[in-house]
Amino acid sequence: MARFVVRRIGSAILVMFATSVLTFLIFQAIPSGDPAFRLAGKYSTPAQVESIRREWGFDKPIYVQYVKTMEKIFDGSVISYTQQLNVDQTVIHDLPATLSVTIGGAVIWLLVSVLFGVLSAIRAGRYLDRVLTVLAFIGLSMPAFFLGDIALYYLGYKAKIFPLGDYVPLTQNPGAWFSHLLLPWMTLAVLYIGIYSRILRSSLLDTLGEDYVRTARAKGISERRVLIRHALRNSMIPLISLWGLDFASLLGGGTILIEEVFNINGVGKYVGDSIGRLDVPPILVITVFAAFAVVALSAIVDILYAALDPRIRLSS
């Protein structure tokens, strides 16, 4: 197990390094010439551009530019020259809102997906399976902004059941925090329940046909125990792996549409505002952090499953 953990962490570090290099090269290759001018913004003066060029090392060889860029990203000294704000401090300030949206939505879509996936598998080809399939495809086809606007209009504005967006910190008022986030959670969950439930249905149907499942049934083990203790446990492996990747991508700004619709000042909204202003430093920093989060969570999920299932570490 220790060797597997070391190998997995080592490969994650290599992937992070490759990702940082690729992100830096893409940033360098963006059309419009001088990277110092892109960082400074379109309303910058020649003196400001020259100062940024020296500060970031853009007058040095490409490998020096890479080292300087990564140093500035990770020591928290990147400044949004358009907004005159420290990017890392702004991300830290906005992260609780994004965490609140992401964690709540992720828990809901995982639990509901497991319920729908199991029901579809045990009723495969029957009426309930067809209904859940239709609902899954409806959820998949709904754009986030459309579903959010509809929910906000009918459940917030018309019915006045939920607040009209905004975010209240958990430490300030737990009740208001929950009520303001319930609609964003449900909207985010609907976007993922369809694909997750279909993946689990397919995986569960394959697992139920395995020899060890038939052996468990032949031993007289109840169908419920066979389903939960044997089939579902193994069928959840690809689902949890995918869940970890999606969770990380949402933390890195993937909630942009949800936060825009519900007026939540999180990392996603910060990314959206930065794109609208052509403000490059926040986009660069959040892209690197989001990529690292995906790689790190992927490694953590692999290690957890290797601890639960020895076959994974033996095959790696």
Image (spheres, rainbow, N blue to C red):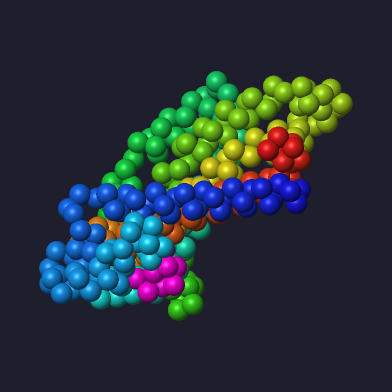
Q: Residue at x 57, y 34 (%)?
A: 200
Q: Magenta stretch: residue 75 in it? A: yes
Residue 310: x percent and y percent? 76, 40
Q: Is residue 22 left or right of residue 278?
A: right
Inspect this view and state whether residue 163 appears: no
Extent of the magenta region? 70-78
Q: Residue furthest right?
A: 219
Q: Is residue 121 left or right of residue 76?
A: right
Q: Is residue 103 left or right of residue 7?
A: left
Q: Residue at x 63, y 30 (%)?
A: 204
User: Tag count in the figure?
Assistant: 0
In the rendered view, tell whether residue 241 sits above or below residue 263.
above
Residue 92: x percent and y percent? 43, 71
Residue 165: x percent and y percent? 32, 63
In the rendered view, tell whether residue 72 sits above or below residue 255.
below
**Which one is in front, 184 or 206?**
206
The quarter of the picture where residue 91 lies is bottom left
Q: Residue at x 41, y 32 (%)?
A: 137
The quarter of the picture where residue 101 lies is bottom left
Q: Residue furthest front?
A: 61
Q: Quadrant of the C terminus?
A: top right
Residue 159: x percent and y percent? 32, 57
**Which one is in front, 144 or 85?**
85
Inspect this view and state whether residue 198 appears: yes
Q: Is residue 121 left or right of residue 67?
A: right
Q: Residue at x 28, y 46 (%)?
A: 146
Q: Magenta stretch: residue 69 in it? A: no
